[in-house]
Structures are given as structure tokens and as C-alpha cells.
Image (tube, rainbow, N blue to C red):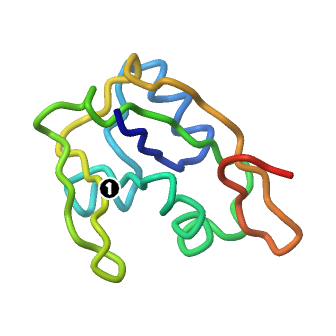
Amino acid sequence: MSRIYKILPRGEWEAAQAAGRFEGSGVDLADSYIHFSTAAQAQETARRHFAGQAGLVVLEIEADDLGAGLRWEPSRGGDLFPHLYGPLETRLVRAVTDAPLDADGAPQIGPRA
């Protein structure tokens, strides 16, 4: 099993919970798929795309739970990134954690010292 991660503002997650599904953030809707990262990719994704944004959460999802809608496609530096073509059912989210900003304003993803 392989875990993948979605970084988003807490308010978007709360709206998704109320609806029972997450349709995507602005960039996801523009690209017609939901962007995810692997554990190895998540911190760089946070640094590049979410710097200075407070109130973020990280969703943890089991990739196998997403079925045929999940595709692994080349992106940054040719790395394969998980993209979901369709909504994310909130019941599939295994964990939700805060992503506090470090002293440089970068969201901290994963274990913290």
C-alpha cells in the first residue's frame, strides 16, 4: 500500500467534509484533476506552492483506495506524481494533520522535530 498526500486550506477541507467529497482546489479545478504528492514529494510541494499560507492541513490517503481514477503522471523534474481524475470521497481520507509554518514561512509536512 502507498500513502499519498493532499495539502489544502483548512476551510476547503471543512467544506469538503460537509459535502462528503472534495472536488479540488483552484489549481485542481483548472487542471481537471486533483494534485497529490508522495511522502517524498510533499515537503517540496508545500515549499513551492504553499509558502506563507497559514491554516493548511495535509490529507493522507491510501492510493489503492482511489481506484482507476488515480494516475501517476510525470511532472516536476520528470517525477511521477499522483493525480486523481474525479472527486475525492472524504470517507477515504485516513488522517488529517496540521501543516504549521516554519520560521521561513514554509509549511511543515510530516514528522517534526
Q: Is residue 33 left or right of residue 79?
A: left
Give the vertical position of 14 relative to 63 (above or below): above
Q: How many marks?
A: 1
**Quarter of image, res 73:** bottom left
Task: Name the foreground residue: 46 vs 80.
Answer: 80
Task: Name the foreground residue: 47 vs 62.
Answer: 62
User: Which residue is the extreme one toward the bottom?
Assistant: 77
* Residue under the point 59% across and 64% down: 46
Task: Name the foreground residue: 25 vs 42.
Answer: 42
Q: Residues within 10 Å of mark 1 (few under 14, many from 20)?
A: some
Disc 1 residue type (three-letter):
Asp
User: Which residue is the extreme one toward the left?
Assistant: 68
Q: Is residue 67 left or right of residue 96?
A: left
Secondary structure found at label 1:
helix
Q: Quadrant of the N terminus?
A: top left
**Quarter of image, res 44:** bottom right
* Percent position of residue 50, x then y: 60, 65
Residue behind mark 1: 28
Give the vertical position of 76 relative to 87 (above or below): below
* Percent position of residue 3, x then y: 42, 39
Q: Is residue 29 left or right of residue 44?
A: left
User: Which residue is the extreme one toward the front?
Assistant: 1
